[in-house]
Amino acid sequence: MRILILGGTSFVGHAISVAATVRGHQITTFTRSTLPPGAKEGIVETLFGDRTISDAYNFVHGREWDVVIDTWFGAPRVVQESVLKLKDHVPYYAYVSTCSVYDGNPFDGNALPFGVDESVAPVPADPSAQSTNYPADKRGAELAILEGYGAGGSLIARPGLILGPREWPSRLSWWLGRIREGGEVLAPGPADLPLQYIDARDLAEWLITSVEQKLTGTFNTLSPIGHTTFSALLEECKKVTGSNAEFTWLPVDFVTENEIQPWNEMPIWITPNMYGFYNFDTIKAQAAGLKCRSMEETVANTWHSVLTESQADLPEGRVPP
């Protein structure tokens, strides 16, 4: 397949580029400045430009691809412009969105129900809007794609927490670094908090397999509920780093009373009103072939990445929740 990847150099985009090249597809990436994997070897065509400016897509004239894959988060109008400029050159659009689009976003203090599936209403959004907030931006991008390509010409993946090598922002790697320091490590409870996430490489593999099959529709792309627990994850971090850390598990009430912020200040950990974020219904994606590697493999590979690769920084002004 001829695949156009908008981005393809950081975290999820990087994983998508690798998955596509391993399968032998013809890859073109359109990125601001960073070389994608495979560019130096001459197996990936790299085009540079800024998709936020009006003439960004001049490169498409006289060219065609089978699918465009997009991971953009930010102003939905940028995706709307991509749809407008690419529609006559690419018949099929795949987009990495987020489960944060569902109405009742726990990051706004709401309680997201357990078992949310793809039929649950998303947040209100405008496909032509400037950037407002992460859920509305992602949903606006979805709407732009659906308006341009329709449900029959698009694939929308909705992951939640994404972990794995080269991750950004630093979440699993934050815990790996802290635990490697050793000593007493304060861990917010409950220790048996079930975690649901997706390794970026599993997301990428599923996405490439799906576009090969011309799969359409919207899918919650995450591990099964309870893929691991918070304590199991931290113990594995201790194991792979060879740390002497000792965990002191703090009751959730103590943590919240001391105004320790979940997710951003304390990565991966969430408060009870947010537990629905680790309880999305993923039956549809599992039926469509989504497979998730073990937590142990994700932790080990992420630690190896921390030790051996330069870690990605978020572009200025782009900080997802």
Image: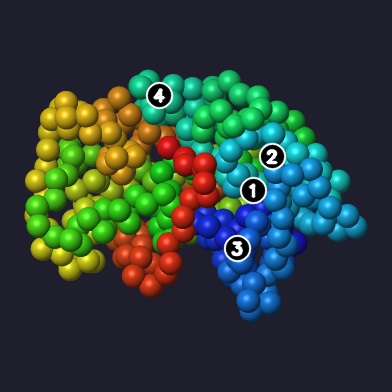
Position of residue 72 relative to residue 20, above or below, is above
Disc nearer the start of the sequence (1/2): 1
Q: Which residue is mark 2?
A: 79
CB under 8 Å between discs 2 and 4: no
Disc nearer the start of the sequence (3/2): 3
CB under 8 Å between discs 3 and 4: no
Closer to the observer: label 3 or label 4?
A: 3
Q: Which residue is mark 1?
A: 70
Q: Where does the image place residue 17, in percent across and percent down from the top left?
A: 60, 62
Disc nearer the start of the sequence (1/4): 1
Calculate the distance from the C-alpha at mark 3 to the C-alpha at mark 1: 16 Å
Q: Residues within 10 Å of mark 3 (few under 14, many from 20)?
A: some
Position of residue 65 relative to residue 317, above or below, is below
Calculate the distance from the C-alpha at mark 1 to the C-alpha at mark 2: 8 Å
Calculate the distance from the C-alpha at mark 3 to the C-alpha at mark 2: 20 Å
**Secondary structure beneath disc 4?**
helix
User: At x 57% / y 60%, what residue is drawn?
Assistant: 9
Nearer to us in this view, 61 or 99? 61
Disc nearer the start of the sequence (3/4): 3
Res. 65 image quadrant: bottom right
Look at the image and tell me whether residue 205 can be seen: no
Calculate the distance from the C-alpha at mark 2 to the C-alpha at mark 4: 25 Å
**Secondary structure beneath disc 1?**
strand
Q: Residues within 10 Å of mark 4 (few under 14, many from 20)?
A: few
